[in-house]
Image (cartoon, grey):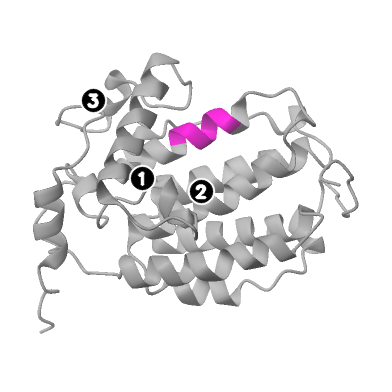
Amino acid sequence: MRRNLRFIWDDARVDADFTGNDDEVLEAAVDMSIRARMALAIGLYEWVVWRFDGLHAHAEPTQVLQAAWCATVDPRYLRYFELDRNEWIGPVDGALWCAMTHLRQGLAHGYAYEGDLFDTLRFLHDLAAHVLPLQEGFRNWLKPVLDRLVDNHPPHNPDPLADLFNQRIGEQLGPLVGRDELDPNLPPNPQRTRAFLQQTLAGAIAEANPFLATPADLADLGFDSEPYALPDATTLAAQWLRPPPASS
């Protein structure tokens, strides 16, 4: 069933044919930390990637997926990329190109410009709803995941003076979020989350993932900490539990 392409696709109009209702996703995302929004975007992206599994020969979609999880640790870990649109045409390749491009935009810029991340959530939700042959599984997954991320990863306003030069972006996004938290059948486990992210970073480095920023790339972006290290859990907790700055 997964291999039957029964959706309308036109590379010249793309989302003009989408009919999904993304209100639930966007309303829930308002009540999440930035990092939780990033993880949600990756979860939506995964639905698109696995829907087309076996229907193309490209390595890029899963490489982007791996690098995207690395970017939830620090958005600068996702290397800037542009894939030639002319090489990604049609209902499979075109959909994947759109998914990768929108995901990169949201993850790379959403910590500073939240509108970019909300646009990514909207697009990826509507794309997944458009291309999936069966909607019930997607809908049954989405609601409990939204509830979990809202409950466990509420928003917060970090101290704007804590990182004036954006050198510690990874500490400003909220507690770490792992792939298990996108599985409604698994209880949250911070230790498992850290292990997953450490393994993902190590795998991306070992495999020379082309979408993972190199140490030289990070240096050019002003990254002056140890590359690919997870933020200290105690530091994250202290940062996130600090009350929002008082309004004047």
Q: Nearer the viewer, residue 50 or 8?
A: 50
Instruction: Name the residue tied to disc 1.
Output: 72
| Image position, residue 49 (x, y; %) | 65, 41
The three-letter code of the residue at mark 2 reads Ile
Asked if disc 3 and disc 1 are in contact, CB closer than 8 Å, the reply is no
| Image position, residue 86 (x, y; %) | 76, 30
Instruction: Name the residue tied to disc 2.
Output: 42
> Mark 2 or mark 3: which comes first in sequence?
2
Image quarter in which the C terminus is found = bottom left
Residue 223 visible to an observer of this rendering: yes
Segment colored magenta: 62-67
Report whether 184 appears left or right of 156: right
| Image position, residue 195 (x, y; %) | 30, 36
Is residue 51 one of those drawn in magenta? no
| Image position, residue 174 (x, y; %) | 25, 58
Give the residue at x 37% y 19%.
Answer: 205
Instruction: Name the residue tied to disc 3.
Output: 219
